[in-house]
Image: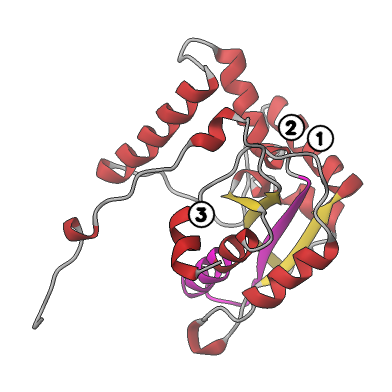
Amino acid sequence: MDVIEAIKLRKSIRGFKPAPVSKEALSRILDTAVRSPSTMNMQPWEFTVIAGEVLEKVRRANVEMLEAGLPPNPDVPYPDTAGIYRERRVSLGIHLFELMGITREDKAKRMEWRKRGYRFFDAPAAIIISIDRSLDVPTAMFDIGTVTQTIALTALNYDLGTCIHYQGARYPDVLRKLAGIPESKRIIICISIGYPDPEFPANKVQSEREPYQNITTWCGI
């Protein structure tokens, strides 16, 4: 697939077919992804790929923690947003809820949607990206962003969809226990991956983007 076409077509997939993703396809995706740029070639990323019974156990444990009302304790805190940044976030949420038929008053459906994120959106596989605790977090976060996008774009070449999310890592001790991620690693982000379900309502969302003209300053050109 042409890289420009891939960038324009990529979107978050929140509903997947149950068909498994082969280890071969995931290996090829990661083999491409490690060519991503990084600060001074540090390549800070480390991958843990989970599927099958391990992923099912992680799903169940995450939901149990959520239902028990235990506060999330992510390795990297994600601050709330304000202003236009919050407006964009809220706009996406409203669109998703409209497609899923979830009203503001329907607490049960809202909770079920929340659980879906903690279940990795019921994807057949997930890639957990971590960094060593010795690394500077702000610098490494830039690098994690580049490798994450490369994974999402490369997945399209194999007819796979992805959803980049934090929910799966909000209880990091679950992943440490069930996926063997050591305490010496800081869990940054999750990528759910699988074959998109075209009938799933939320998959119709193509989130809007601010026109580049609104956020670009030209100097000397």
141 above or below 115? below
Of the image marks 3 and 2, the number of the one nearer the N terminus? 3
From the top left corner, tell me how far across and down residue 207 is, in percent. 41, 43
Judged from the image, the secondary structure of the residue bearing numbered disc 1 is helix
Residue at the extreme bottom:
40
* Inter-mark Cα distance, 3 to 2: 28 Å
Q: Nearer the viewer, residue 183 or 209?
A: 209
Q: Is 86 situated left or right of 163 in this image? A: left
Amino acid type, residue under disc 2 in the picture: Val
On the image, numbered disc 2 is attached to which residue? 63
* Inter-mark Cα distance, 2 to 1: 5 Å
Q: Nearer the viewer, residue 145 or 73?
A: 145
CB within 8 Å, label 2 to label 1? yes
Magenta run includes residue 133: yes
Judged from the image, the secondary structure of the residue bearing numbered disc 2 is helix
Few, some or many residues within 10 Å of mark 1 (<14, 14–19, 20+): some
The residue stretch that appears in magenta: 124-149
- Residue 183 appears in the picture as rendered: no
Q: Nearer the viewer, mark 3 or mark 2?
A: 3
Few, some or many residues within 10 Å of mark 2 (<14, 14–19, 20+): many
Checking the image for residue 10, the label placed there is: 3
On the image, numbered disc 1 is attached to which residue? 60
Taking the spot 30% from the left edge, 37% from the top edge, the residue there is: 87
From the top left corner, tell me how far across and down residue 11 is, in percent. 51, 49
Residue at the extreme top:
105
Few, some or many residues within 10 Å of mark 3 (<14, 14–19, 20+): some
